[in-house]
Image: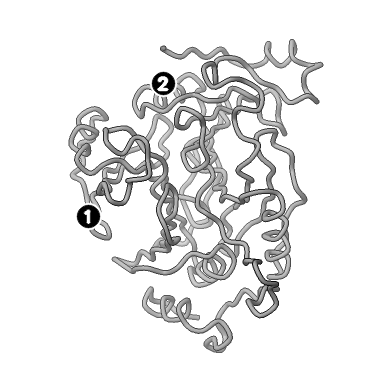
Amino acid sequence: MPDSPAEIAAIVTCESRDRTPGTYAVETRWDPEDLLPGEEMPRTTGIHHVTSIAGSAQGNVDFYTGDLGLRLVKRTVNFDDPGTWHLYYGDRSGSPGTLITFFPWQGVQGGRRGVGETVATAYSVPVSSLEGWAVSLGVEREPTDRFGETVLSLRDTEGSSIEIIGEHPSLAEDSPSAADSKIRGFHSVTLAVAQPEATARLLSDIFGFELTGEEDGRLRFQLAGSGPGRIVDLVRPEEAVAARLGSGSVHHVAFRARDEEEQAAFREEILGAGIDVTPVQDRQYFRSIYFREPGGVLIEIATDPPGMLIDEPLETLGTELRLPPWYESAREKIEAALPPIETTA
């Protein structure tokens, strides 16, 4: 197996039907020659959301609405554990590409960083606003340069790694907040994997990312076009210790599907690659499927519709507990179990 980023890059960029013997390959069921006129292979348009683990619900709200200035757009529960909040933060309408969500598990042990997880979530801001962000967030570490962009690195109240990355206006021109200092959405996520070539092949063959650079052992994969969340970086830690889920850990990263039809096509692609994937799950605000990519990172594919406005108007997003129909009969019990949270207007 290849060891260096350069070797991995050579494998990823080689012709899909002329791979180096012994390297990982995702054998897809799609072939451009098999498509009917007007049909396209499924390709994601970027990151849909990132879901992480927190300990304190109130501390989580304070950091993401106060320090980062995001809007709490949904108060609901973990559909698999309705005694736990599921809090969504994003832009004013909770658009895909801006959403970060949390399960605040009170008393949970801190996570351990390692391979097989998402190790950093990066936001995009206008490059001219970086100095102001450093002051407001109290970032004492000197900013770093990565692929020609300036990166501020910090941790949230639970120790989760957050990055603020300055982008030039031409790269953020489609964003309504491009002219000011607000977060415009995701810049990227960083995945830590022991064998990057396997994950690299999946990003390329199934999701449509292209390898665009290598720097200091970091591989950058990027989608064509503009808009938030179109970059995934891969790193291989020197010590291949398995990650342990806990407070401060990213639970999963979700990529976008335009609709349920495209999601179904993705599912067939993933199954065709020999990877187990869940049936479709109804998450009320989107439909989801889940799988672990070859490096061990938990991945979701979530549909853009129906979105955050399905059960409350834009003006009052995130102000009241919203439950799916199958939990409404237990509302009183659920409300009693959830720790109180407050936001400042």
Label count reads 2
Residue drawn at x 36%, y 77% is 6
Residue drawn at x 53%, y 34% is 101
> Cα distance, mark 2 to mark 1?
29 Å
Query: How is the rendered protein coloured?
Result: one colour
Q: How would you rate the neighbour count of disc 2 (Cα within 10 Å): few for under 14, some for 14-19, many for 20 or more?
A: some
Residue 273 showing in the rendered view: yes
Q: Which residue is under mark 1? A: 145
Q: How would you rate the neighbour count of disc 1 (Cα within 10 Å): few for under 14, some for 14-19, many for 20 or more?
A: few
> Element under label 2?
helix
The x and y percentages for residue 93 are 50, 29
Residue 300 showing in the rendered view: no
The x and y percentages for residue 126 are 26, 41
Between disc 2 and disc 1, whose residue precedes? 2
The x and y percentages for residue 273 are 68, 70
**Lateral position of residue 140 relative to residue 186, left or right:** left
Amino acid type assigned to the residue bearing label 2 in the image: Asp
The x and y percentages for residue 40 are 62, 66
**Lateral position of residue 38 relative to residue 21, left or right:** right
> Element under label 1?
strand
Residue drawn at x 52%, y 25% is 73
Q: Quadrant of the C terminus?
A: top left
Nearest to the observer: residue 288 or residue 37: 37
Amino acid type assigned to the residue bearing label 1 in the image: Asp
Against 245, residue 191 (above or below) is below
Q: Which residue is under mark 2? A: 62
Residue 182 is drawn in which quadrant?
A: top left
